[in-house]
Image: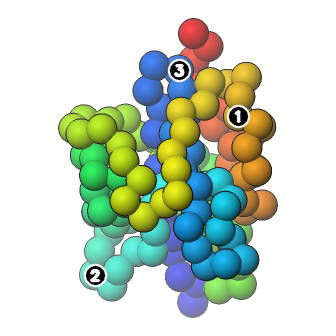
């Protein structure tokens, strides 16, 4: 059975939040959507809300799901939702850095390979402005 990882495409004022991985070494420095593994007995939405609170120190409202199950490493799939902030200001508690990216800046950072197709899907959903 595949392990589920959830991630948030947090969009505010026409910009997407990206998070730079601190580890493991093979992924350190790459950029991703914030999120993490779903714990046993936890729903996808509960995990997403918990992960954003732990990783970023923010509360989110979960919106529409983006695509289906996105393949990660063997045995893992990622599920991604649009989200918006409802409380707090994002801080990189578990990441090296955070960046808000306008649609024209989305490809200025080295996204992790598994996240890149999701960036393309999210790009169409970010309002210009």
- Return the x and y of residue 4 as percentages of the image width and height: 51, 74
Which numbered disc, 3 or 1, marks the residue that appears first in the sequence? 3
Residue 71's label in the rendered image is none
Residue 41's label in the rendered image is 2
Q: Residue at x 60, y 31 (%)?
A: 101
Q: Give the quadrant of residue 46.
A: bottom left
Q: Work out how far the residue at label 2 is from the one at label 3, CA to CA, in angstroms.
A: 34 Å
- Return the x and y of residue 26 as percentages of the image width and height: 72, 77
Is residue 57 shown left or right of residue 72?
A: left
Which numbered disc, 1 or 2, marks the residue that appears first in the sequence? 2
Q: Is residue 71 visible in the rendered structure shown here?
A: yes
Residue under label 3, please give it. Answer: 14
Element on which disc 3 rests: loop
**Quick one: 45 or 28, which is closer to the camera?**
28
Residue under label 1, please give it. Answer: 106
**Which marked residue is nearer to the observer: mark 1 or mark 2?**
1
The relative height of residue 44 versus residue 66 in the rendered view (above or below) is: below
Element on which disc 2 rests: loop
Q: Work out how far the residue at label 1 is from the one at label 2, CA to CA, in angstroms.
A: 35 Å
Q: Is residue 45 visible in the rendered structure shown here?
A: no
Element on which disc 1 rests: loop
Q: Give the quadrant of residue 40.
A: bottom left
Label 3: how many residues lie within 10 Å, few (<14), some (14-19) or many (20+)? Answer: some
**Which marked residue is nearer to the observer: mark 2 or mark 3?**
3
- Return the x and y of residue 64 as percentages of the image width and height: 46, 41
Is residue 88 shown left or right of residue 34?
A: left
User: Dividing the image into 4 quarters, which one contains the C terminus?
Assistant: top right
């Amino acid at each position: 059975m595949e392990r589920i990882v959830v991630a948030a495409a947090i969009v505010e004022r026409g910009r997407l939040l990206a998070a730079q991985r601190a580890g493991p070494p093979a992924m350190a420095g790459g950029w991703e959507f914030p999120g993490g593994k779903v714990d046993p007995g936890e729903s996808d939405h509960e995990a997403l809300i918990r992960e954003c609170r732990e990783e970023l120190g923010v509360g989110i409202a979960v919106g529409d799901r983006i695509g289906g199950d996105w393949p990660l490493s063997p045995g893992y799939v990622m599920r991604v939702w649009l989200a918006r902030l409802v409380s707090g200001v994002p801080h990189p508690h578990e990441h090296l850095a955070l960046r808000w990216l306008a649609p024209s800046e989305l490809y200025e950072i080295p996204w992790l390979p598994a996240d890149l197709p999701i960036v393309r899907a999210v790009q169409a959903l970010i309002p210009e402005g």
